[in-house]
């Protein structure tokens, strides 16, 4: 069959790479894809199509007899690509526009969590800046200010001082605030309590009723080693995340994931697609949901796909066949650790430079794959940077430490001007496993 993957980042390259291993697949089209997913003389498994408009994609999928579509990013989901494809009888895995509000509106997500008793930080919702300023003055710092609408990772300010909190309120409540997509009703913010603990990414697949958890993972959001510097889309990730012990895993399923999927069903908005809970796990192993995303994480997907042994096409077909279709499916995982190091462009994240020639990328092996993201070919065929996160070097190894070393060695070999990458991806797991060596064999997936 022919499959369409919507998106063009490292997450979508990793999805396409995994889907291409299925004997059921003839060709995988990516819209828009990147240089790593373009058709070449020596590899015709992939091809890129240059469409982004939802109606145009639906027309193209119908006329090219696409049998399955998988959506990477949140934007097309929030714009209703799943509703549009389904209305024309096309099989697609993702949440409807209404269900995607779990990510596209923080106010919707917080009200949903409160209504269904899902543990999360206490919060209040504001549209009036004077009232919001009074509220933070009374609460004090640290405090967290979140824009209601999608903001490509720029809608959250963890304010360590009251000054930062007041500035964030003014910025986010402006009409036309930079980079924020306001929902109907105009600018709106959520102000929530600051939570302490360790973060983890917990991603599941849902078919409207049943839930299939993927392997746990942990992202690294700051630009620099030691979790310093500005926030980014993610500078690296690994799987499994030792902070998600079997006990934490069970609690997350029972207290966060199942109530979320049931809650959506009760509210009349069946949830289908990947569902990503961003977790904060406190020192006692109590998880709270920081946020929901209605999609896979990037770069979490890259290590997760490296570890997935089950045929992903079979899983997606089951998930889109019928409500409850995931029931008989079990996922098999490689027991090794997968770890991905993002190699970013000069100037990322504030002003990434495009057009730098990428002179060398190591060849893929069975346990090391270089997923591409912000890459394109120039008119002369030269591979060059075309986005903030350029590549993600992803490896499998017997320990987090070995995976980190191997990924760093490969990243050091990648050659383009101004490249930036962290050398400490996985540091929390490494510290934990040194502190409690017995944690190793007891990890949940
Ligand atoms: P979000 O997009 O809601 O996940 O927020 C982005 C990042 O902000 C998270 O990955 C956390 O690092 C941080 N964050 C969000 N909410 C909180 C909170 N209530 N307490 C502490 N940190 C938070
Ligand atoms: N890696 C975080 C995200 O995809 O939202």
Image (cartoon, grey):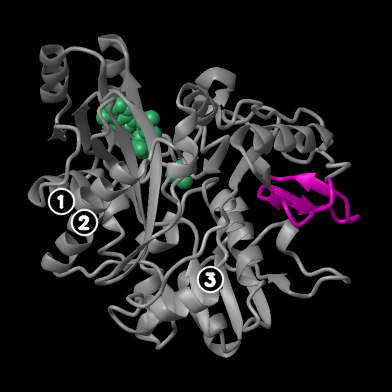
Q: Residue 312 carries which label?
A: 3
> Reading the chain from its start, which is encountered first: label 1 or label 3?
1
Viewer can see residue 247: yes
Please state the horizontal and vertical placement of residue 362, each as a whole percent of the image.
Answer: 84, 46
Q: Which of 47 and 334 is in front in this view?
A: 334
Q: Distance between the residues labelled 1 and 3?
A: 30 Å
> Reading the chain from its start, which is encountered first: label 2 or label 3?
2
Quarter of the image for residue 119 reads: top left
Looking at the image, is 359 positioned above or below residue 271?
A: above
Looking at the image, is 47 positioned above or below residue 228?
A: below
Viewer can see residue 229: no
Q: Is mark 1 within 8 Å of ligand 1?
A: no
Taking the view exactly as shown, the residue that stands out farthest to the right is 380
Q: How far apart are marks 2 and 3 (CA)?
A: 24 Å
Q: Name the residue under label 2.
A: 260
The answer to whether residue 206 is left or right of residue 332 is left
Q: Mark 1 points at which residue?
A: 112
Q: Magenta stretch: give its range.
A: 362-386
Please state the horizontal and vertical placement of residue 283, each as a whole percent of the image.
Answer: 29, 25
**Is there CB contact under 8 Å for labels 2 and 3?**
no
């Amino acid at each position: 069959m022919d499959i369409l993957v919507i998106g063009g980042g490292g997450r979508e390259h990793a999805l396409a790479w995994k889907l291409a291993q299925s004997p059921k697949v003839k060709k995988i089209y990516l819209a828009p894809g990147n240089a790593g997913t373009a058709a070449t003389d020596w590899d015709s498994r992939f091809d890129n199509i240059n469409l982004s408009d939802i109606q145009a994609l639906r027309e193209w999928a119908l006329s090219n007899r696409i049998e399955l579509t998988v959506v990477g990013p949140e934007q097309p989901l929030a714009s209703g690509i799943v509703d549009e494809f389904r209305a024309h009888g096309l099989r697609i895995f993702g949440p409807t526009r209404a269900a995607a509000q779990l990510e596209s509106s923080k106010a919707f997500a917080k009200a949903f969590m409160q209504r269904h008793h899902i543990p999360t930080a206490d919060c209040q919702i504001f549209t009036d800046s004077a009232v919001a300023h009074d509220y933070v003055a009374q609460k004090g710092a640290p405090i967290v200010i979140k824009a209601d609408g999608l903001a490509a990772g720029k809608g959250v300010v963890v304010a360590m001082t009251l000054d930062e909190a007041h500035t964030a309120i003014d910025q986010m409540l402006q009409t036309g605030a930079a980079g924020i997509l306001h929902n109907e009703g105009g600018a709106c913010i959520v102000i929530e309590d600051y939570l302490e603990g360790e973060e983890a990414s917990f991603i599941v697949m849902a078919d409207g009723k049943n839930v299939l958890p993927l392997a746990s993972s942990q992202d690294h959001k700051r630009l620099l080693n030691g979790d310093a510097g500005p926030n980014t889309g993610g500078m690296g990730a690994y799987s499994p995340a030792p902070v998600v012990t079997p006990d934490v895993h069970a609690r997350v399923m029972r207290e966060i994931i199942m109530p979320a999927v049931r809650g959506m069903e009760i509210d009349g908005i069946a949830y289908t697609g990947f569902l990503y809970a961003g977790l904060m796990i406190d020192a006692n192993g109590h998880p709270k949901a920081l946020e929901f995303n209605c999609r896979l994480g990037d770069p979490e997907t890259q290590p997760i796909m490296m570890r997935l042994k089950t045929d992903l096409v079979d899983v997606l077909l089951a998930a889109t066949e019928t409500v409850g279709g995931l029931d008989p499916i079990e996922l098999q995982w490689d027991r090794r650790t997968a770890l991905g190091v993002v190699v970013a462009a000069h100037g990322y994240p504030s002003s990434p430079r495009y057009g730098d020639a990428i002179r060398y990328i190591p060849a893929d092996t069975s346990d090391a794959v270089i997923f591409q993201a912000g890459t394109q070919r120039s008119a002369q065929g030269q591979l060059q940077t075309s986005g903030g996160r350029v590549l993600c070097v992803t490896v499998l190894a017997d320990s987090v430490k070995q995976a980190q070393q191997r990924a760093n060695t490969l990243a050091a070999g990648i050659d383009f001007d101004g490249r930036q990458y962290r050398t400490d991806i996985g540091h929390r797991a490494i510290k934990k496993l040194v502190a409690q060596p017995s944690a190793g064999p007891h990890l949940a997936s």
